[in-house]
Image: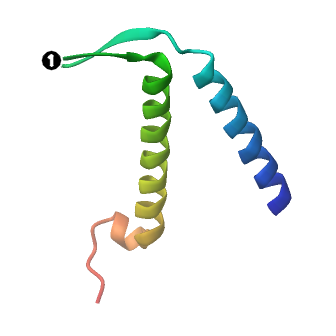
């Protein structure tokens, strides 16, 4: 199972690198009041990194909190 996970991670990493490297043209991105001109590869990488960071943060928050029916119902623990 561990080897299968490593193979999937390697394949997804290679796909992400290929997608980034095939998109080198400069594009304009707008976010609220900001307009940014950057290579599309940079914006794709930043989006990938942000998604990864949010996934890790979500995993960490879910793993660190004890989710029980009592805590979900708002009851106090003794």
Eyeballing the image, is 77 above or below 32? below
Pick the front one: 24 or 68: 24
Eyeballing the image, is 78 above or below 45? below
The image's colour scheme reads rainbow
Eyeballing the image, is 10 above or below 20? below
Q: Residue at x 63, y 16 (%)?
A: 22
Q: Residue at x 48, y 54 (%)?
A: 56
Q: Residue 60: x and y, percent?
A: 45, 63
Q: Quadrant of the C terminus?
A: bottom left
Q: Residue at x 67, y 39 (%)?
A: 13
Mark count = 1
Q: Quadrant of the N terminus?
A: bottom right
Residue 68 in view here: no
Q: Residue 7: x and y, percent?
A: 81, 48
Residue 28 in view here: yes
Q: Is 27 displayed left or right of 32 in the figure?
A: right
Q: Residue 12: x and y, percent?
A: 70, 37
Q: Secondary structure at mark 1?
A: loop
Q: Is 18 displayed left or right of 57 in the figure?
A: right
| Residue under numbered circle 1 | 33
Pick the front one: 78 or 60: 60
Q: Residue at x 64, y 31 (%)?
A: 17
Pick the front one: 42 or 52: 42
Q: Residues within 10 Å of mark 1 (few under 14, many from 20)?
A: few
Examine the image and state in which quarter residue 34 appears. Answer: top left
Q: What is the residue that sits farthest to the left in this orientation?
A: 33
Q: What is the residue that sits farthest to the bottom in this orientation?
A: 78
């Amino acid at each position: 199972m561990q080897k299968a996970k490593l193979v999937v991670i390697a394949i997804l990493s290679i796909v992400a690198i290929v997608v980034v490297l095939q998109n080198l043209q400069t594009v304009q991105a707008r976010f609220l009041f900001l307009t940014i001109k950057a290579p599309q590869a940079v914006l794709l990488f930043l989006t990938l990194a942000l998604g990864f960071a949010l996934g890790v943060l979500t995993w960490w928050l879910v793993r660190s909190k004890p989710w029980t029916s009592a805590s979900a119902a708002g009851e106090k623990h003794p």
